């Protein structure tokens, strides 16, 4: 005897093994969103509002911030949360508009690749940062790098 | 016999109306107005449209931004040259647009979260949209003059 299985209305979409990935993605958007408000507003406050804002930013400014592990971790957490949040949001949009399996597949692989590469790059940049490459451009840097 | 049905469903906490069944009758001379359903043309729809556009814009900015920041590993000169372009008037105006997008997306994101998790969220979703707009205007009023002063006088 055979039966045709029709899923009950509103049953979760799982990929066989029972993990409801769409639900966790949905939750991630909300949890990361709340944290990102704090991280991004803090980032913009320090880099665009304090002092003379954007006109004060240069290599020495970044060296000053990343001398403190607090700002290193702030930036790395912001990097991971924002890229995964944005990438997952872009995935939703591709699912909404891209027609055809191949187009959708290519676009989603491109998003995944961009997110993965930039997360690795950005994390390496923060943790391997060297304030003493090139010619030290400010008094603070000259002092710091003389000790090396 | 021509029939039109409208189904209202709740998706992702927002009201979404789905128009089904056919085209409007030919006899009708009235232009169909977008605001014909609970959703279309109202606060819920615009908040979704803006949220989506700002989300995409911020994503593309971030792709470039991680790359320009990575120049600190190349040389101070390379980084200073690129960040110097952030300090020009044209980019300064672009940054106003970026901040406008991020501030809307952030406040409206919090609104979406309240619609989803707060028991009264759906009842106040329209009011909350206007609160988002008000907070957005206030933030921009504080930010824009200060930012443009920095950009144009340094
Ligand atoms: C015009 C506005 C902005 C300016 C002037 C700016 C400036 C900077 C600067 C100077 C850095 C170097 C490190 C630091 O200062 O913490 C940086 C890093 C970073 N910014 Fe921004 N930022 C802006 C907007 C944003 C926005 C809207 C986001 C989030 C969507 C963001 C995300 C990041 C991340 C993730 C890093 C770390 C990059 C890495 O790990 O290599 N920034 N930004
Ligand atoms: C500032 C804090 C942020 C908050 C509170 C926030 C909130 C949200 C929420 C709750 C959603 C889910 C909407 C839904 O499921 O219907 C969402 C979607 C999205 N977010 Fe964010 N977000 C923030 C930052 C960002 C950043 C930095 C990016 C880009 C890197 C981004 C890009 C997107 C995209 C592309 C979507 C998909 C939009 C859609 O499906 O229409 N968001 N955001």
Image: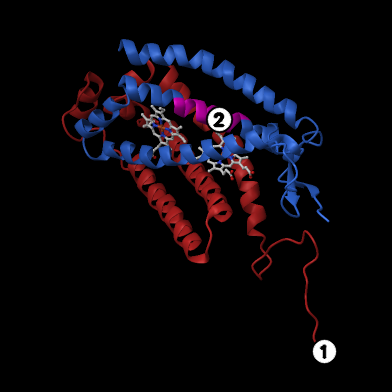
Chain colours: A red, B blue
In which chain is the residue bearing label 1? A
Label 1 – label 2 distance at C-alpha: 58 Å
Would residue A144 appear left or right of A43 to someone viewing this image?
left
Note whether B27 is above or below B106 in the view shown. below
Residue drawn at 44 percent across, 18 percent down:
A49
Chain letter of mark 2 equals: A
Q: Position of residue A147 (x, y in %)?
A: 20, 29
Is B82 left, or right, of A74 in this rendering?
left
Instruction: Tell me which residue sits at (46%, 41%) in the image.
Output: B59
Residue named by callout 2: A38
Range shown magenta: B97-107
Residue A51 seen: no
Q: Is residue A8 magenta?
A: no
Residue at x 72% of width, y 36% of height: B30
Residue B52 in view here: yes
Q: Count the numbered circles shown.
A: 2
Circle 1 is placed at which residue position?
A: A1
Quick one: A66 or A121, which is closer to the camera?
Answer: A121
Residue A31 percent coordinates (x, y): 62, 41
Q: Quadrant of the C terminus of chain B?
A: top left
Q: Residue at x 39, y 42 (%)?
A: B63
> Relative to the observer, which residue lies in front, B48 or A49?
B48
> What's the magenta bit mostly, secondary-structure-wise?
helix
Splitting the image into 4 quarters, where does residue B64 fall?
A: top left
Residue A25: percent from the left, percent from the top?
61, 52
Mark 2 C-beta to ligand 2 under 8 Å = no
Residues B124 and A73: in front is B124
């Amino acid at each position: 005897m055979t039966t045709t299985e029709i899923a009950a209305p509103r049953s979760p979409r799982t990929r066989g093994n029972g993990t409801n990935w769409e639900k966790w993605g949905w939750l991630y958007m909300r949890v990361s969103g709340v944290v990102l408000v704090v991280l991004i507003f803090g980032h913009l406050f320090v880099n665009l509002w304090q002092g003379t804002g954007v006109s004060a930013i240069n290599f020495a400014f970044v060296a000053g911030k990343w001398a403190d592990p607090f700002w290193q971790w702030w930036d790395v957490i912001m990097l991971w949360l924002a890229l995964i949040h944005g990438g997952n949001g872009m995935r939703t949009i591709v699912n909404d508009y891209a027609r055809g399996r191949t187009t959708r597949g290519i676009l989603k692989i491109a998003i995944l690749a961009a997110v993965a590469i930039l997360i690795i790059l950005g994390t390496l940049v923060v943790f391997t940062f060297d304030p003493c490459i090139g010619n030290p451009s400010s008094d603070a840097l000259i002092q710091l790098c003389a000790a090396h | 016999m021509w029939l039109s049905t409208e189904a209202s469903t709740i998706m992702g906490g927002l009201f979404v109306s789905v128009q089904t069944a056919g085209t409007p009758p030919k006899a009708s001379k009235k232009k169909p107005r977008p605001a014909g359903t609970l959703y279309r043309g109202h606060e819920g729809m615009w908040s979704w449209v803006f949220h989506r556009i700002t989300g995409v814009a911020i994503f593309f900015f971030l792709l470039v931004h991680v790359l320009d920041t990575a120049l600190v590993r190349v040389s101070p000169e390379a980084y200073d040259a690129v960040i110097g372009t952030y300090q020009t008037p044209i980019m300064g105006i672009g940054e106003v647009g970026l901040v406008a997008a991020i501030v809307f997306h952030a406040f409206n994101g919090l609104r979406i979260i309240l619609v989803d998790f707060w028991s009264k969220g759906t009842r106040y979703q329209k009011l909350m949209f206007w609160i988002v707009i008000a907070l957005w205007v206030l933030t921009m009023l504080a930010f824009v003059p200060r930012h443009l002063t920095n950009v144009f006088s340094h």
